[in-house]
Image (tube, rainbow, N blue to C red):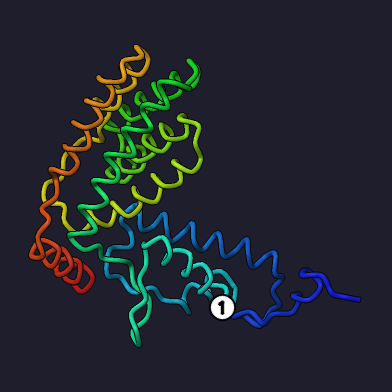
Amino acid sequence: MRKTRRQSAKAIPAANGATENADNNDDVSERIRATLAAAIGEGALKPGTKILEEAIAEHFGVSRTVVRGALGVLESDHLLERKRNRGTFVAEPSIAQARNLFEARRKLEGLLLELVIARATEDQLDALQKLTDEEEHIHHHGDEKSKTVLSGKFHIVLAETAGNPVLTEMLSKIVARLSLVMALYEEERKDDCGADHHRMIVAALKAKDLAKAQQLMDHHLADIEGRVRLTEGQGDRHTFLAVLENFS
C-alpha cells in the first residue's frame, strides 16, 4: 500500500531533536516567512542585514531545511537575496529597480482606482473612510512604526476593494519591495502618514470621480517618491549609517 504524504513525512529531524510533521512544517514555514516579511516591511530588518538561519531554526524549533524553504519564498519575492559563499541577506534594490517599482506602482494603483469606481459598495468605501480616520488618530497619537504600517494598509485594502486578488497580490509585493527602497534611499522623512491624501482619494471615489481620484493618487505617490534620492551615494550612506547604528 502506498503511503500518503502525511504518513511518509512524520519523522524529519528538527533543530531541537524533536520530530516534525510535514503539515506542521508548512505552517511554521509560513509563520517564518510572514515574520521576516513584516520585520522587513516595518524597517526592523534593514537592507543588507544578514539572515541567521540557525537562529531562526532554534527560535521556531524546526530544521534549517524548513527555514530555507521560507527564505526561498522571500527570495522569489525579491525581499531577500542569496550571496554565494556568504549567506542570505535582506535585499538592497538597485536604482533601476527602484525606478521600475515606482513606475509599476503608479500604473497599478491607477488601474485599481478604475476597478474600485466600478465595483466598490458603499460599505466598502465607508470602511476605507474609517481607515483614514484611524490614520488621523495615529498621526496625532501613534509612533512612526504605527504610521508606516497603517499607511501601507490603506493601499492594500483599497486594492482588495477592487475585487481582483491577482492585482492585490501584485501591489502587496511592490509595496513590500518599496519599503526597502525607502530604507535605502529616503532623504526626507515627513511627520505624516498620508491621511489627508487618503481621505481626499476616498471622497473622490465616493463621488464616482475617477479622474479626480487618479489625480490625487498621482500626487500622493509623487509625494512619496519625492522623499528619496536615487543615487548610489545615498544608498551607500544609508548602508554605512546602519553599520554605525549596529556597532555603536
Secondary structure beneath disc 1?
helix
Q: Which residue is mark 1?
A: 65
- Identity of the residue drawn at 23% across and 70% down: 246
The residue positioned farthest toward the bottom in the image shown: 85
Q: Quadrant of the N terminus?
A: bottom right
| Callout 1 amino acid | Thr
User: Looking at the image, can residue 200 be seen?
Assistant: no
Residue 58, given in percent of the width and then of the height, sits at 53, 76
Specify whether 21 is left or right of 174: right
Residue 126 makes an appearance in the image:
yes
Q: Residues within 10 Å of mark 1 (few under 14, many from 20)?
A: some
Which quarter of the figure is the C terminus placed in? bottom left
Residue at point 27% right, 32% down?
A: 139
Residue 153 location (% of width, % of height): 39, 38
In the image, residue 65 above or below residue 107:
below
On screen, residue 53 versus residue 150, left or right, reads right
Is 114 in front, or is 16?
Answer: 114
Q: Nearer the viewer, residue 106 or 65?
A: 106
Q: Position of residue 143 (x, y in %)?
A: 29, 42
Residue 107 is left or right of residue 119, and the answer is left
Q: Quadrant of residue 78?
A: bottom left
User: Position of 237 compared to 83: left or right?
Assistant: left
In the image, what residue occupies the spot 43% across and 64% down? 76
| Residue 216, position as x, y percentages in the image | 23, 26
* Residue at 46 percent of width and 69 percent of height: 71
Residue 109 is drawn in which quadrant?
top left
